[in-house]
Amino acid sequence: MANRSEKMTMMWPLGGAVVEVIYSSSGSYMCQHSNSASLERCQLSFWESVSVMTPAVSVGNVGQLAVDLIISTLDISKVGYFYTDCLVPMTGNNPYATTEENATELCINAEVYALPSKELVVLQLRSPFIKNKYRPFCQTILAWVKSCGFARIVLLSSSHAYQRNDQQLHGTSLRYLLSSVVEKTIESTLKKLNGKELEQVAAFPGVNDDEKVFHIPGGGITKLLFTESCSKGIPMVVLLKFCSEGDNIPDALTLADYLNEWLHLTATQNESSSIKSSRWKIPSSWKLLFGSGLPPALF
């Protein structure tokens, strides 16, 4: 069977109309717009202030759950999809259904949402990666981000709490990573928030403690995507939380709050953590987060 290349299809409001942008992994564009004079803006300058947010498929699915909260709360419109052979195929009902009518809408494993008022594009991933497909997926995502000229890519992730080193056991469980080309203003802002820069650890403990590397166990594509973005000069911000498998809703709420402290996506109501988290709208699909209820016939 012939291999199909990854492609992104998006519908984006521009100049009172809607632009359809189709990006392929080869780096080519196809833009359709009722006003042909707008096509040049679509291809570069239009995206230069837009951030792309996506989760890593990581421990506890914390990044994916946090993205769910953001899409549901801000009522972000679905504008397209990401076709790729790197993810396990899946389909399901609308995860953000609010009525019986829109509950029957279908979703797939990778979809694109956009909120022009916040200059935000969200790529939600809903299935795990196929073996040996991490690198092709990262390369495609970064090529898309670089070719479109997006301001930055923001990755929401998580890492195994039980594999923290001694210094990571103290203080907050939130961490951030910044690629070398990220603006200094972002770095100074994140340092003031409820998180710390991810610590590096010895590459060969007990043998050579001088060589330091980032260790993100359970982080999925996080380390690879960050390393590749640094080598390609692409602005990238990683926000992650140490956690354990189980009920990860509290972890997702905490990570979403951390992101909101930086980007101010929703209004800050109170410094109390319990009240802060109440600003988020729980998606209807979370009713089945742990499966359906027990059949009455069991009793």
Image (tube, rainbow, N blue to C red):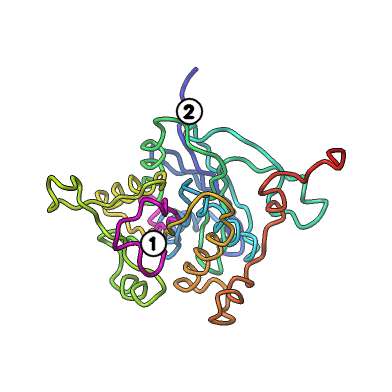
In the figure, is residue 83 to the left or right of 190? right
- Residue at 83 percent across and 52 percent down: it is 100
Tag of residue 181: none
- Residue at 25 percent across and 56 percent down: it is 200
Question: Which quadrant is home to the C terminus?
Answer: top right
Residue 52, horizontal then vertical, whole percent: 46, 57
Q: Is residue 145 above or below residue 266?
A: above
Q: Is residue 258 above or below residue 47?
A: below
In the figure, is residue 48 to the left or right of 84? left
Residue 144, horizontal then vertical, whole percent: 41, 47
- For mark 1, what is the residue? 151
Q: Residue furthest front?
A: 299
For the magenta stretch, what is the residue range? 146-173
Q: Give the mark nearer the N terminus: 1 vs 2.
A: 2
Q: How many neighbours does mark 2 have within 10 angstroms: few (below 14), some (14-19), or many (20 or more)?
A: few
Q: CA distance from mark 1 to mark 2?
A: 28 Å
- Circle 2 — which element? loop
Amino acid carrying label 2: it is Arg
The answer to which quarter of the image holds residue 153 is bottom left
- For mark 2, what is the residue? 4
Q: Please tell me which residue lies in front, 11 or 128.
A: 128
Residue 194, horizontal then vertical, whole percent: 41, 73
Q: Residue furthest top?
A: 1
Residue 24, horizontal then vertical, whole percent: 45, 39
- Circle 1 — which element? loop
Amino acid carrying label 1: it is Ala
Q: How many neighbours does mark 1 have within 10 angstroms: few (below 14), some (14-19), or many (20 or more)?
A: many
- Residue at 33 percent across and 51 percent down: it is 226
- Residue at 32 percent across and 74 percent down: it is 185
Q: Please tell me which residue lies in front, 245 or 157.
A: 245
Q: Is residue 244 above or below residue 109?
A: below
